Amino acid sequence: MQDHSFKDYVANHLYNELFTALSNFLEENHGNLHVVSQHVTAIDEAKLSDIEIKGVYIDNQPGMKIAFDVLVEAQLEISEYDRHTDRNDDAYPWFKISCTGDLSHNLDDFSTNAIEEYNCKDKQQHPMSDSLVLIIRKDQLEKVATDFLQRHYPEALATPMSLSPVDLADRMGLSVDLKTITSDFSVFGQICFADCDTEYYDEDTDSIKTIHVNKGTILVNPNAFFLRSLGAVNNTVIHECVHWDLHRKAFELERLYNKELTHIRCQVVGGIKKDNIRTATDWMEWQANSLAPRIQMPFTPFKQKADALIKEYQKELHTKELIDVMEPVIDALATFFCVSRCAAKIRMVDVGYEEAMGVFIYIDDQYVKPHAFKKGSLTKNQTFSISMRDALFESSVNPTLRATLEQGTYLFVDSHFCINSPQYIENDENGQPTLTKYAQHHIDECCLIFDLSVHPSTNAYGKQFYTECVLFRDASSDIIFEAAYVLSKNNLTIEEHAKLVQACNDEIHRVLSSLPHDFSDAFVALTNWRDISVEKLAEESRLDARTIRRLRNEPDYTATKETIVAVCIGLHLPPPLNFKLLAKAGYCLSNTPLDLMYHFLLTYKWPYSLDICNKYLTSQKMKLLGKKNKKF
């Protein structure tokens, strides 16, 4: 579909009718016009020379009818006659011509109902865009979904149930036919607004064939996924039902320009468009994407079912914490309503359970442990959990974050920048740092917040709906996210959090000020302070014991930068001591990619070996750093 203008159609096809209607109005009402003129004080005659269409305000009506107010600037010659002299002047007042018409009749029944001088006051009950797409704000989506169900599937509003998409289509006079629409699955659904011949892909013969379909036929590709993790056939059928219910008028406008147009194909496309450059088709897809899950999971019945499941699982698992039951509740909701886990999770957030934002998150090919936070701590485009790639990038290029982290107050643990305190971080059975149970239940108290967005290069359909809850990062999803540090209220409370680690910082300062001048002596002092044996340090640093002994006992021994970094990691030193020991060995870190990685390791004590980090550094994910167009 193209973006055709209803205003242009009115100007090009209804000009004569509008001109005649306004001319007749002026013949009867010229004496009541409020026109300012320096020459004419009382209008005895007003002749209409021309009109210019300035705007059209459209109001949605039942069926295929529309009401629309046409704003016209009139070119008038006004005259005043008396026995002494005639006075004339030109005037250009604006008028509002209220009209109605039926798009199913190609507006052949067009009529004007009222005309008045324009007073700059226009308010439509159900406003439509110039492309005849219903204007729906995000905060109106629930109301629109409820209205849809009241008209087509009212029982779904009365009690929790799984809505049958095929039954819904049947009630709307539509039929569903499963067809592989394209060979590459680039089209997952199609709604036919008129009887037509349409193409489909025959998998048996590997060829494109043509079939005749009737008006109101929904073609669904049984193999295509709607956003992969957001459901397949069920969601697609409802998606097409929304098109039929809300977008037939936009389609009929296109038909006024192109009679050959017969259907809308919902195509898998890439890229994210800003609101001000979206086409009519973009807006129709956003509406269908946003409304389909709200129709499948109506607000009140969904919340009733969620509340019941929460109580059931809290009793079964002997817990009062919502975060402990959120995963099984979401999975049970997905099964009950026949939707995907992602759709159920997003709906949980919609109905007020922000705890759902902290479960089913996959980062760096690993599952992030469920975590909870105070209500209102995050907006839907924020997160506590970020990838290694984003952690490295933001800590390198964001001076505010870098300065904060170099104090040693935070460690990067379990995909979070968490306060370095035993209250929040402990070692697991393998000796690796991990979040404590308390930290998982109070993540807002101890972890930094990042803004999260979808990378522009991501090739996925309907990302506006997906980013309603960007925290759902599915292990199978090809959507690439980017995180950016933000100076939020939570992040600005570092002074308060720092009190928790003040004693540790005092100790670090004491050790730092007492370190010997020579590297080998300083190294011995730090191994003694950490109370770690040569053998244990060799194991922790992935070095051999002989190298550790030479560092301790041979002042003239020259070790590589990598060796010193490995030693610092093995000692689990705070950042200031890491950089001091590195300096005593005669090394400093530059802005090369390798040194940036070393800086990251020494600052946040990354719990992986150097070879693992180097693999990430040279992987495709790390190459995305260059797309930020920032210089390290």
Image (tube, grey):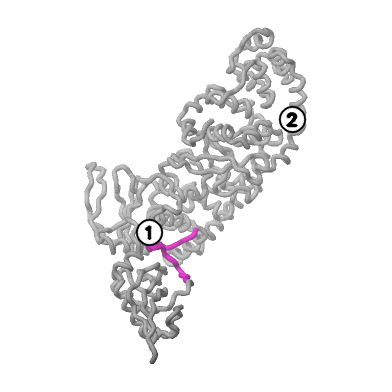
Task: Answer left or right for 168 relative to 377.
Answer: left
User: What residue would you read off at disc 2?
Assistant: 505
Magenta residues (range): 121-137
Instruction: Please tell me which residue lies in front, 341 or 6.
Output: 6
Q: Which mark is residue 431?
A: none
Query: Label 1's element?
Result: helix
In the rendered view, tell whether residue 14 sits above or below residue 423.
below
Q: Amino acid at mark 2?
A: Asn
Query: Residue 243: which numbered mark, if any?
Result: 1
Q: Main secondary structure of the magenta part?
A: loop
Q: Sequence order check: which comes first, mark 1 or mark 2?
A: 1
From the top left corner, tell me how far across and down residue 160 is, in percent: 51, 59
Quarter holding the C terminus is top right
> Residue at 67% across / 43% down in the picture?
492
Estimate the x, y position of residue 569 in percent, counting from the top left.
Answer: 63, 22
* Residue ranking furthest to the front: 84
Q: Is residue 415 left or right of residue 54?
A: right
Q: Say which residue appears at 54% left-offset and 36% top-offset.
A: 367
Label 2 residue SS: helix
Residue 194 shows in the view? yes
